[in-house]
Image: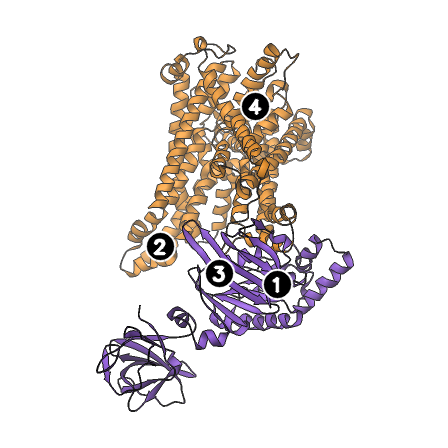
């Protein structure tokens, strides 16, 4: 059952439509990541959910309660929404101690002193900050500051947690640690998460579902597996993971790939009906291209780089360049060799 | 042998030596002489005598007045500055951008000219506003007497509040909006956020701005000289002036002046030290990364009343005094009502084209400003180069000496220059224009060093090294790489000196002779002599020159940024 509901949510800045008729439902305890390049409207969407921005159309409900609605001109201010939120730049207050930072949301709610103490300590305990409680957040590392922000968001025991690129200001090794911590806290407290990121591996690791956005328009909503395994369009395919594309077309005599025709019969052609006007894009992940000795499309190895566990090949195929990545245990051709390539699970998209 | 001589007295050492010599002569010796005169009596160190001087009623009254006035101005200026800064950065006040620029205008206007205008408006008997109330509305006495502590504090506030305004509006603009947004999402309303988050976070900026107000007010001569002296309100700078001028160089009065100057220097140093501490220790890292616009407080019903308040404030503090100056400058006789038949252009004509005293003053100010700016600009480049780029031991002395005048009030510099250049070392420049030039150079060197060091720090050593590696000699590298890159800093330094020098009063009033009045001195003395109309006319012309100069800089600077 949907807990957070966004219906036809639209936001314009001047003539630019930053978010265009976005529909999204998030279940209780579910984590949804909004993924897209910068300027795609993901942060604007999050800010509309938080209540910092109003809507130019549509409505937002949480737990059945209407929070923002263009039609009814209703906007519950952020301070009354009872959400937890973590910002990219930490936004911990340097003039307050770690404890006071976390206690702040409880103090403005005028809770009894004892309860403020108990709940602040609980939040600090869950974020491993008890020992730093009386210090200044300025003495903490980036990861520590972000934990303060997380504890502050947790203190009110919210049902909704909004995370605005919470990990992108952190050092890479902290990022992974924090990912697990966030996931862990979600399991423990059961809040729903709306998560903004431009890092696809972060989105994959954290979320139950991913929403991919481009220029204000939703491209695909699905589980990480769906979004990675069956991208709905070229943009999603390209944005999630490594990719290469080859222009291709059906002809009388065979299948044309990157300017070279492979006569029938061959195994390269797409399933019937997929290429409506006879031309299209063949999309493949570098790890899902195999070397074959016969058949397959023909290429010549231009460069070969050892990346440790994997070997990265650049292969000239017709008028295009294809990237292939294989683990070092798979025997591969040398630079200058001709080779055959086979696509393990090709995707087909309309030509642009 | 030649090589050895070169290694001992190479260009760096030569430049270093010259820089030290210039700074010691211009800054170091005058300052030392002040302390020397204050503490050295009859050949030995003497503190008891200093205390006697300080306990003299006249002296401690002046000290107390300085304290009362500067604390008062600091409090009102901080409140006014913080409030307007908040209004133009954090609310939906209409015409915010324009208002922000207008609030900076008082910075351009010399406070003593403002004081002059307010004297014309609010002096107890002759002030126009008071007269209107007494004559037209039948009041028994004046509505407001400007010759009081409150009057002086109000006038100084009008011209000094931008120190806080600039610091606080800058901090509020640069502050990461998510610091406030995270408080909102935590459940705090805007009032709570302002009180618990915003104000504490900008507190270091508020404090550092208010300490600047205090520093300037403490050392401020003009307003107190115009408004306070008549009712016997002296502060330290006006008493120093009084001592130097009225007692024709007697030892006792010079001593009192040096003791007062010492107190002023120590207080100023203390204030600057405090400010430095607040800035380095207390300034929070609140600068934004990626940012959305901060949430604006919706003023709703207060929008128009607050806009009117701003307009009234600007009208009252900028338009009214300025208009008064020009109008009084056009009166046939001071005290007449402003009607068409009482107005004349002949005052302006007289002071610009006929009267040698005012023509000389304008000429003196412009030539002094230009020469001081040019000399200080070039000396500043060389000294900054030594400080920033050269690896010479002892360059800390240069930095100290160069920045010293930054914390030393103008009247102290003037006093030091009198002590050093009145024949003590065989050179007597007193009553000549040269003594003012020397004092200007000492006073404005710090400005030049700041602008030039900032520009030089941008020029990374590798730029010069790359030029050398490309085959250029050191001289070529300096000419083709360093100088073009530093030029904006030099231009900035020039104007940072030229414009304040044009309107300078505090230093030149202590140093002028019969033929070496500056514009500021001429305005001040004409007013003292009761030539109010000519004083106002000259002030009006000074205002025009100053505003034109400021506009010219704005154009030059923005042109630079555009290119």
**Image quadrant of residue A175?**
bottom right
Front disc: 3 or 2: 3
- Name which of mark 3 and mark 1 comes first in the sequence: 3
Chain A representation colour: purple
Q: Which chain is orange?
A: B
**Cβ–Cβ under 8 Å for marks 1 and 2:** no
Q: Which residue in the structure is indicated by mark 4?
A: B225
Query: In this orientation, does residue B219 appear?
Result: no
Q: Secondary structure at mark 2?
A: helix
Q: Which residue in the structure is indicated by mark 2?
A: B5
Q: Gap in Å between the C-alphas at discs 4 and 3? A: 69 Å
Q: Is residue A288 above or below residue B80?
A: below
Task: List x then y, in percent, for residue B136.
Answer: 59, 11
Chain for disc number 3? A
The quadrant of the rendering that contains the C terminus of chain A is bottom left
**Image quadrant of residue B265?**
top right
Q: Secondary structure at mark 4?
A: helix
Q: Gap in Å between the C-alphas at discs 4 and 2? A: 57 Å
Q: Which residue in the structure is indicated by mark 3?
A: A22
**Cβ–Cβ under 8 Å for marks 4 and 3:** no
Residue at the far left in the pictured view: A253
Front disc: 4 or 3: 3
Q: Residue at x 74, y 56 (%)?
A: A111
């Amino acid at each position: 059952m949907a807990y957070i509901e966004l219906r036809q949510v639209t936001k314009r800045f001047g003539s630019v439509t930053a978010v265009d008729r976005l529909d999204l439902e998030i279940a209780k305890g579910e984590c949804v990541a909004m993924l897209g390049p910068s300027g795609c409207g993901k942060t604007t969407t999050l800010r509309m959910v938080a209540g910092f921005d109003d809507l130019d159309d549509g409505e937002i409900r949480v737990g059945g309660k209407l929070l923002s609605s263009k039609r009814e001109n209703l906007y519950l201010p952020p301070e009354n929404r009872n959400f937890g939120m973590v910002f990219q730049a930490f936004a911990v207050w340097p003039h307050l101690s770690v404890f006071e930072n976390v206690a702040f949301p409880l103090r403005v709610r005028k809770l009894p002193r004892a309860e403020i103490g108990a709940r602040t300590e609980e939040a600090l305990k869950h974020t491993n900050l008890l020992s730093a409680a009386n210090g200044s957040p300025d003495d903490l590392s980036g990861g520590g500051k972000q934990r303060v922000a997380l504890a502050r968001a947790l203190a009110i025991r919210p049902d909704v947690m909004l995370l605005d690129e919470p990990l992108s200001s952190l050092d890479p090794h902290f990022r992974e640690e924090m990912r697990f911590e966030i996931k862990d806290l979600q399991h423990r407290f059961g809040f729903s998460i709306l998560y903004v990121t431009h890092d696809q591996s972060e989105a994959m690791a954290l979320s139950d579902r991913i929403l991919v956005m481009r220029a204000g328009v939703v491209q695909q909503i699905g589980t990480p597996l769906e979004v990675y395994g069956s991208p709905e369009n070229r943009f999603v395919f390209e944005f999630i993971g490594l990719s290469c594309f080859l222009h291709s077309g059906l002809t009388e005599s065979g299948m044309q790939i990157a300017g070279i025709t492979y006569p029938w019969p061959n195994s390269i052609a797409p399933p019937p009906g997929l290429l409506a006007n006879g031309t299209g894009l063949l999309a493949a992940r570098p790890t899902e291209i195999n070397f074959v000795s016969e058949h397959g499309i023909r290429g010549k190895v231009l460069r070969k780089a050892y990346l440790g566990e994997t070997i990265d090949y650049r292969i000239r195929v017709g008028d295009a360049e294809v990237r292939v990545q294989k683990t070092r245990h798979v025997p591969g051709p040398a630079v200058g060799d001709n080779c055959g390539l086979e696509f393990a699970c090709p995707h087909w998209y309309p030509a642009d | 042998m030649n090589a050895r001589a070169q290694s001992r007295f190479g260009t760096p050492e030569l430049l270093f030596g010259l820089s030290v010599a210039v700074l010691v002569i211009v800054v170091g010796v005058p300052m030392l002489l002040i302390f020397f005169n204050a503490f050295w009596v009859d050949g030995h160190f003497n503190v008891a005598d200093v205390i006697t001087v300080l306990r003299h009623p006249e002296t401690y009254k002046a000290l107390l007045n300085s304290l009362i006035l500067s604390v008062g101005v600091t409090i009102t200026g901080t409140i006014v500055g913080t409030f307007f800064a908040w209004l133009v950065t954090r609310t939906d006040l209409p015409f915010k951008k324009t208002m922000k620029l207008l609030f900076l205008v008082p910075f351009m206007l010399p406070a003593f000219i403002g004081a002059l205008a307010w004297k014309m408006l609010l002096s107890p008997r002759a002030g126009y506003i008071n007269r209107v109330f007494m004559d037209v509305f039948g009041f028994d006495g004046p509505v407001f007497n400007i010759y009081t502590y409150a009057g002086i504090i109000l006038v100084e506030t009008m011209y000094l509040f931008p120190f806080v305004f600039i610091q606080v509006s800058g901090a509020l603009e640069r502050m990461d909006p998510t610091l406030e947004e995270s408080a909102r999402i935590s459940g705090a309303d805007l009032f709570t956020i302002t009180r618990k988050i915003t104000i504490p976070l900008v507190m270091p900026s508020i404090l550092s701005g208010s300490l600047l107000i205090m520093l300037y007010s403490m050392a401020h001569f003009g307003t107190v000289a115009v408004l306070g002296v008549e009712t016997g309100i002296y502060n330290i700078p006006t008493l120093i002036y009084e001592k130097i001028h009225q007692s024709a160089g007697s030892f006792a009065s010079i001593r009192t002046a040096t003791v007062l100057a010492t107190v002023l220097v120590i207080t100023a140093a203390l204030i600057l030290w405090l400010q430095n501490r607040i800035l380095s220790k207390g300034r929070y890292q609140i600068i934004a990364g990626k940012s959305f616009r901060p949430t604006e407080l919706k003023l709703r019903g207060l929008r128009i009343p607050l806009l009117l308040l701003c307009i009234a404030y600007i009208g009252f503090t900028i338009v009214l005094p300025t208009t008064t100056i020009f109008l009084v400058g056009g009166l046939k006789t001071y005290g007449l009502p402003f009607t068409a038949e009482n107005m004349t252009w002949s005052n302006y004509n007289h002071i610009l084209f006929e009267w040698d005293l005012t023509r000389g003053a304008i000429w003196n100010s412009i030539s002094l400003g230009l020469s001081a700016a040019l000399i200080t600009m070039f000396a500043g480049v060389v000294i900054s180069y030594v400080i920033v780029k050269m690896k010479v031991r002892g360059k800390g002395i240069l930095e100290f000496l160069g920045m010293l005048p930054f914390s030393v009030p103008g009247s102290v510099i003037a006093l030091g220059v009198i002590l050093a250049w009145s024949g003590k070392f065989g050179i007597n420049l007193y009553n000549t224009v040269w003594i003012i030039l020397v004092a200007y150079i000492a006073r404005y060197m710090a400005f030049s060093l700041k602008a030039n060091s900032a520009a030089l720090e941008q020029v990374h050593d590798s730029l010069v090294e790359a030029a050398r590696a490309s085959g250029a000699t050191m001289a070529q590298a300096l000419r083709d790489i360093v100088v073009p890159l530093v030029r904006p800093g030099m231009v900035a330094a020039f104007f940072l000196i030229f414009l304040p020098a044009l309107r300078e009063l505090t230093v030149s009033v202590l140093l002028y002779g019969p033929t070496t009045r500056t514009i500021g001195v001429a305005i001040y003395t004409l007013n003292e002599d009761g030539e109010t109309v000519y004083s106002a006319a000259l002030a009006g012309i000074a205002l025009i020159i100053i505003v034109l100069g400021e506009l010219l800089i704005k154009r030059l600077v923005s042109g630079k940024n555009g290119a």
